[in-house]
Amino acid sequence: MKRELFLEDSYRREFRTRVRKIDGREVVLEETAFFPGGGGQPADKGILSIGPINAAVVDARREGGGIVHVLDRAIPGTVKDLKGDLNWERRYAHMRHHTALHVLSGVIWRAFGAKVTGGQMRTNRARMDFSFPGEWTAEVVGEIERLTNEALAEGRPVRVYGLPREEALENPDLIRTQVNLVPERVETVRIVEIENLDTQADGGTHVANTREVGEIEITAHKSKGRQNKRVEFSLS
Ligand SMILES: [Zn+2]
């Protein structure tokens, strides 16, 4: 894979590229805007078109340094170039939910000293698990929702950049999010920073400003053990 376009520009929704390999329904491209899934964000769907022929991308995954696009049908092995179009509505929903999760993560760390242990996003909802040290009540959940919406409405810029591994390992914000788990062969860590709120090593796609997220509504919350808590939310 020469370029993973989604890492450079999360708003890139179409592209033309050369084919590297076709194996029945599985295609590897020179470049792609299709996110292969990871870090709680689902793989993108969309269309690959060869002239007038369209094939749906039903899944994508990372494999051996490339990204495999899984199609709904086999395409001829002779195809050299094609065009890709993301299902943008779906991807943009993932971006909004992903940024919302990071804002939530920053808020609960700053307000309650709670660390995130996992997260998962969909097009219409997301959930986050964290280790919460204090008492877990409906009032606390209401406060988390209020503080998150306040931070979102402040219109904080979301910046994506690379940081040398050594620097990342010394940044206290990044240590909190376990940057040490980034594989040692990675020399430059990709950072997603929400201004004055949350900084994480992250490979996903985000909106450019928290205002694009809108508001969260916490739809469910539960205690999954003494410290392990979960919130689910949707966006409006
Ligand atoms: Zn993330």
Image (cartoon, rainbow, N blue to C red):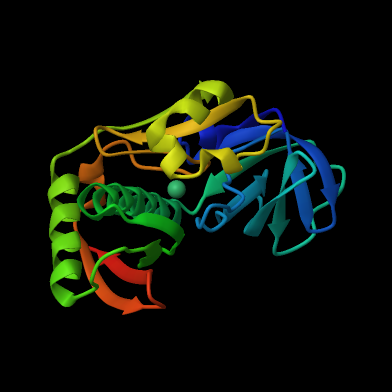
Quadrant in which the C terminus appears = bottom left
The image position of residue 1, as x and y in percent, is 72, 33
The residue located at (17%, 46%) in the rendering is 151
- Taking the image as shown, residue 105 lies to the left or right of residue 107, namely right
- Taking the image as shown, residue 63 lies to the left or right of residue 144, namely right
* Along the line of sight, the residue nearer the viewer: 90 or 197: 197
The residue located at (50%, 44%) in the rendering is 178
Q: Looking at the image, is 228 positioned above or below residue 168?
A: below
The image position of residue 64, as x and y in percent, is 80, 43
Residue 171 in view: yes
* Along the line of sight, the residue nearer the viewer: 32 or 121: 121
* Res. 20 image quadrant: top right
* Along the line of sight, the residue nearer the viewer: 162 or 5: 162
The image position of residue 62, as x and y in percent, is 70, 48
- Taking the image as shown, residue 94 lies to the left or right of residue 166, namely left
The residue located at (20%, 51%) in the rendering is 111
The residue located at (50%, 22%) in the rendering is 167
Q: Looking at the image, is 151 positioned above or below residue 230?
A: above
Residue 11 in view: no
